[in-house]
Amino acid sequence: MHELVAVGNDPEAATAIASDLGAICYLSDPKETRPMPFTTMVRAVTDSPERLESAAEFGTYLVFSRVIRERPVATDAGTASPGVTAVFPLLHHPDLTHQEADAHWRDIHAPLALRHHPGMWDYTQLSVISTLGGPQIDGFALVAFDSLESMKTRFFGDDNDREVIYADVASFADSKSPRRVVATETIYGQRPPTSLKKWPQG
């Protein structure tokens, strides 16, 4: 599934656009005091990218979404999803190309994440196909837990989990990748997002 992703810092704009487009919105905790690369993200399927501009202060990206694990709990449209989502921006390792890093992320890291993040109940990789505006990013990992407490205590099960994941991430991702953003997800349409428009078939 190809999507447009708008990343920015205006929660009102992000919420309004996501609602209008039947998209997915991620908002960071407004009480967060640490500096973050961005505070909002909108995932949408639309043929009018300009509709995302007010929510794209950080950047706009064409991505391909890979759902690695889907949580077992559904929510009503427009209702905040349970739990929290950690959004990890990814820059490829300087010794690798985007394609090499992305293949490693998909084929090697994803299975490791499923084994070594015991509390992770939802995991999607947004692989960037093209940067339409803003800094170059290779992908966004959406790693979700059923609660903030679970994310804090069950991100890893033990020291071996931590060592395996840290070593693997260091092999395909740049250590200068932006800080993760912990956010609340709200789905206004379907997940992954689908276009509100329908075209004649046949």
Image: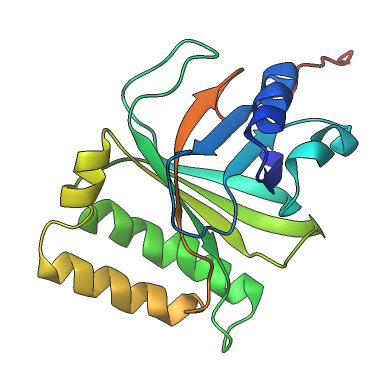
| Residue lying at the far top of the rendered structure | 76
Which quadrant of the figure contains the C terminus? top right
Relative image position of residue 113 (x, y in whole percent): 31, 57
Residue at 54% in and 81% down: 93
Q: Quadrant of residue 74?
A: top left
Q: Is residue 155 above or below residue 158?
A: above
Q: Nearer the viewer, residue 153 or 23?
A: 153
Which quadrant of the figure contains the N terminus? top right
Relative image position of residue 173 (x, y in whole percent): 49, 75
Residue at 36% in and 37% down: 84
Residue at 33% in and 20% down: 73
Relative image position of residue 56 (x, y in whole percent): 75, 46
Count every numbered label the image shows and give the total: 0
Q: Quadrant of residue 165?
A: bottom left
Relative image position of residue 187 (x, y in whole percent): 54, 22
Q: Is residue 168 above or below residue 139?
A: below
Is the image coloured rainbow, by chain, by secondary structure, or in one colour?
rainbow
Q: Is residue 172 left or right of residue 84?
A: right
| Residue lying at the far bottom of the rendered structure | 95
Q: Is residue 175 above or below residue 145?
A: below
Q: Is residue 21 left or right of residue 155?
A: right
Residue at 58% in and 71% down: 91
Q: Quadrant of residue 101?
A: bottom right
